[in-house]
Amino acid sequence: MARKFKDLTEREILALAIALEEEDSRVYADFADGLRETYPATAKLFEDMREEEFDHRAQLIETFRSRFGEHIPLVRREDVKGFVQRRPLWLSRPLKISDARKQAEIMELETRQFYQKAIPQVTDAGIRKLLGDLEEAERKHQVAAEALGEEITQDDKKSEEEAQRRLFVLQIVQPGLAGLMDGSVSTLAPVFAAAFATHSSKDAFLVGLAASIGAGISMAFAEALSDDGSLTGRGRPVLRGAVTGLMTATGGIGHTLPFLLPNFHAAFVAAVIVVACELAVIAWIRNRYMDTPLLSAAFQVVVGGVLVFIAGIWIGSA
């Protein structure tokens, strides 16, 4: 059962302080490890903070030994009421730099408040002085944590922004683009085949809706099960799968909705216009995020779309 902070003895307060500093140093080490490859400048700052927390731990242990002997009782944050349970963000891979910075601010604030609350409960002059020095150090750490982004040079910021863009492309744009291309192109054949085979807007709509939803579900599972993202850095499989599935369904439903129009010829013309818009959007995304020349991207997308479109009309007219 968790104890109240006011009931802790000086020995237990020092033991808790040691545990807190050790935990913080290990969290900062994990932050540095998780950011080192993508954000080396910020990783270096977290490594420096880890070393300072480790030094605080060493000071606390030395004081504990001089006052209470070699055995340090196990007193953890979860054993004392008032501490907020931390989400293990440091275990996430890929680690978001914004999450790490925000967590560092919270950690330093919490540790500083711990020392402020501990000082009045301690009567030993040496221990009070040490806790006061550490409280001041944590205050400086809190300021440093809040200014983590400001301590990075412009070149480092530019590098980190480029890294963030690469992760966004890898984890969101690529699976989304794959889904949009699959939904927009692959469903052209069944939709227009049904349209020309039946000359019925309703039938074409139902076929397109079924094909879009089915393709969305299939692509979502295929992407989510392709890899867990731990080695490739592609992020959470559930998120990738959801993005891919949603964009696949969106791409197919886009040129299916015009067939809600009762007039078949009007619906067909509207669907063709929507297809042209979809292909233009795909070409723009490839140019914007994949660095593909616009004309080249448009050519690649249009050729594929036209081939599938012709195949659908040919099959439907057979």
Image: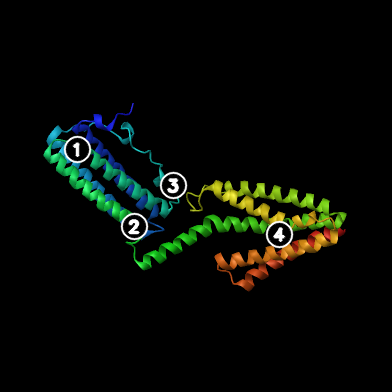
Mark 3 Cα within 10 Å, few/some/many (few <14, many 20+)?
Answer: some
- Do the residues bearing badges 3 and 4 touch, measured as CB atoms within 8 Å? no
Q: Dot 1 lies on which element?
A: helix
**Rounded to the nearest whole Å, what is the CA distance between mark 2 and mark 4?**
45 Å
Residue that badge 1 annotates: 120
Disc with the residue nearer the chain's start (2 vs 1):
1
Query: Image height check: is 158 above or below 200?
Result: below
Residue 122 position by quadrant:
top left
Mark 1 Cα within 10 Å, few/some/many (few <14, many 20+)?
Answer: few
Q: Is residue 288 left or right of residue 39?
A: right
Disc with the residue nearer the chain's start (2 vs 4):
2
Mark 2 Cα within 10 Å, few/some/many (few <14, many 20+)?
Answer: some
Mark sitting on residue 92: 3
Residue that badge 4 annotates: 185
Disc with the residue nearer the chain's start (1 vs 3):
3
Amino acid carrying mark 4 in the image = Val
Residue that badge 2 annotates: 148
- Do the residues bearing badges 1 and 3 touch, measured as CB atoms within 8 Å? no
Amino acid carrying mark 2 in the image = Leu
Amino acid carrying mark 1 in the image = Pro
297 or 155: which is nearer to us?
Answer: 155
**Rounded to the nearest whole Å, what is the CA distance between mark 3 and mark 2?**
20 Å
Q: Residue furthest top?
A: 1
Disc with the residue nearer the chain's start (3 vs 2):
3
Can residue 29 be seen at all in this image of the molecule? no
